[in-house]
Amino acid sequence: MARPEPPRGGPGPSAARAPGARTGTAVGLLRTARPRQWVKNVLVAAAPAAAGQLASPRTAGQLVIVFTLFTAAAAAVYLVNDARDAEADRAHPVKRLRPVAAGDVPVPLAYAAGGLLGALAVAGAAALCNPMTSALLVAYLAMQLAYCIWLKHVLVVDMTVVTTGFLMRAMIGGVALGIPLSRWFLITTGFGALFMVAAKRYSEAVQMEGAEGGRGASRALLGEYTTGYLRFVWQLAAGVAVLGYCLWALESGGVAHSALLPWRQLSVIAFILAVLRYAVFADRGAAGAPEDVVLRDRALAVIGLVWAAMYGLAVADL
């Protein structure tokens, strides 16, 4: 007796869903919006923090608005990306559990929710901030959608787009509040972001090499990079980020004025230690989830707090 042929076109939503993993549509939409990734959007406070303007209640209120708007824009991109990749995700051992791929969120609904969130973010920025903030969000959405459709398949450009997304997060707080962005701030932030992006790609490539026949790759383009090249990129980016920060810290000279100690210059030590600590995870191929490294490593958290204290003292001129 002949066996029935399996259905063509790969596993459907019901096959992709793990037993007991079904969620409601609302919860599925929330999961697709990647709440764990929202911590990245704290970078909107980077420019006001660098300018020493976080103490103002007006600044704090405006940053809450900017954080919300950027989170909505990022969620819109995640929704559209998962809707577009739903069919391919169903064949992936991990991504098949995503709500859209698993069938918990219909593809048309994901597209509609993404479009609505993107439009609301841009309109909200125009109404609550200024035209430049709205324009920056439009540029972010356009760039990320181009990444979902095409740019993630272009070597080097894919890392550049992801890095630019982080840089835009760091810029938008200053743009919304009319704070001038220094060249050293942009260089340090940009190459610091490239360091983390390249370290993540390197970690994924190392893990892929350990899988049989390269299976388990989470990115279609990842196999085109060598681990040696990715290591070179994150090491180069780390060096430029450290150099940029040092030049910024020493720009006004290394002598304290009214402050007890030259806190801005001393903060270089904490900054370099933070880069070196993160590089430990990158070197081990364990920096595949930057948010986990930052939030879970106690030593890195302590170094970050020391750096923040030094920087705060420098801004307060104490």
Image (cartoon, grey):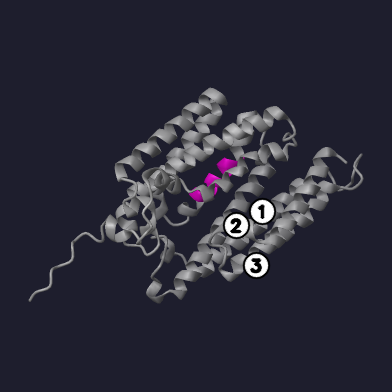
3D distance between C-alphas at marks 1 and 2: 8 Å
- Relative vertical location of residue 51 with respect to residue 311 in this rendering, above or below: above
Front one among 229 and 257: 257
Residue type at the position of mark 2: Phe
Q: Residue furthest front?
A: 20
Q: Is residue 209 left or right of residue 299?
A: left
Residues shaded magenta? 161-170
**Residue at the image position 44 percent from the left and 49 percent from the top:** 31
Dominant secondary structure (helix, strand or loop) of the stretch shown in magenta: helix
- Label 2 sits on a secondary structure element that is helix
Of residues 54 and 317, the one drawn nearer to the viewer in this rendering: 54
Q: Is residue 241 rendered to the left or right of residue 28?
A: right
Q: How many marks?
A: 3
Q: Nearer the viewer, mark 1 or mark 3?
A: 3
- Which mark identifies residue 241? 1
Check disc 3: other Cα within 10 Å, few if <14, some if 14-19, many if 20+.
few
Q: Quadrant of residue 251?
A: top right
Query: x and y percent of residue 95 in the render?
Result: 39, 58
For the point 41% across and 60% down, the residue is 219
Residue 250 visible from this viewpoint? no
Q: Earlier in the sequence, mark 1 or mark 2?
A: 2
Query: Which image quadrant: the N terminus?
Result: bottom left
Could you tell me the amino acid type at mark 3? Val
State the mark number for residue 195.
2
| Residue named by callout 3 | 280
Residue at image position (46%, 65%) is: 225
